[in-house]
Image: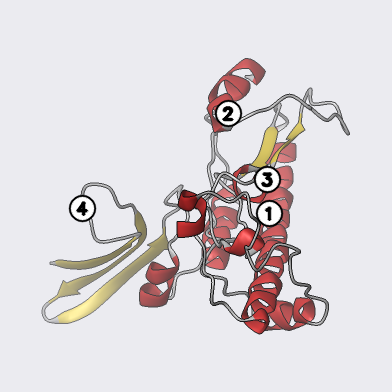
Amino acid sequence: FVVFDIETTGFSPLTCKIIEIGAVLVENGKITDRFSTFVNPQVPIPFRIEQLTSINDDMVLDALEQYLAQPHSKPQLIVVGTYGPHFPYVAPPELFLKYLKTAQLPATWQGNEPWLNAQQRNLQEPNTRAEIVLACQAAYKGLVEHTDGLIGRARAAFDVFTQNRGTPALFGYLSDHGDTVGEHGIYGKKSFFEKSVRIPMVFVGSGVAAGQRITAPVSLLDLGPTVCDWA
């Protein structure tokens, strides 16, 4: 018989995704074979799930690199999700300390602008001490650099994969939201201030002009039509 175990992005059997599968084959009371693999859930792994499972973004990139190291004859649409940069602000220690040395308080960190409305004030964390705000700023910047390294790993593996295939390729990086990180006394993605709603949307690949910048407003709704037009 086979005994298997799965790890998921949460606790709902309807909405959560599998991130790891493990199994053992038991014959005559002894384990005779083992199987274990990570699964790209195509969504970020929540921080609380990372704490429970010890599965993190680096492992997701490991799975991507293993997948791209294999030959695939069919056209590929590969989606890789990382959790960071995201609240809660927990960066690798060395990156946190690196940015803590130069961290600065946002000009609006106290959130006392007279034009803020009642709804915006309800989003504030008004009693946050200055040293906590500086730590949040440092951790978020550390998360940005860590994520940048993950993107670099993904791009390098993707480039080798597409070069070996000799087919047109498109690589993109984008996010679903930003983060105010203490500006206006608000943290996370809870507001419609610029730092919260503005996201990166960067593409490189076959037929994409290097250095071109699109100034028109875009959103995640543009992703599907953009990829389909390119294809």
Q: What's the residue at 36%, 75% (across, down)? A: 52
Mark-to-mark CA distance, 2 and 3: 19 Å
- Locate the N terminus and report the quarter of the image it occupies: bottom left
Q: Nearer the viewer, mark 4 or mark 3?
A: 4
Q: Nearer the viewer, residue 5 or 43?
A: 43
Residue with the mark numbered 4:
13
Q: Residues within 10 Å of mark 2 (few under 14, many from 20)?
A: some
Q: Nearer the viewer, residue 160 or 150?
A: 150
Return the disc, 2 or 4, that comes first in the chain's sequence. Answer: 4
- Residue at image location 20% in from the left, 53% down from the top: 13
Q: CA distance from mark 1 to mark 3?
A: 10 Å
Q: Earlier in the sequence, mark 1 or mark 4?
A: 4
Q: Amino acid at mark 1?
A: Ile
Task: Return the x and y of residue 158 as percentages of the image width and height.
Answer: 68, 45
Q: How many marks?
A: 4
Q: Is residue 65 above or below residue 229?
A: below
Amino acid type at mark 3 = Phe
Q: Single out the residue that lies furthest toward the top.
A: 229
Q: Position of residue 110 (x, y in %)?
A: 65, 68
Distance of mark 2 from mark 4, alpha carbons?
A: 28 Å
Nearest the viewer among 131 and 86 is: 131
Evaluate if marks 1 and 4 touch, with contact meaning CB atoms under 8 Å apart: no
> Which residue type does callout 2 highlight?
Leu
Residue holding disc 2: 223
Q: Which residue is mark 1?
A: 151
**Residue drawn 69% across and 43% down?**
200
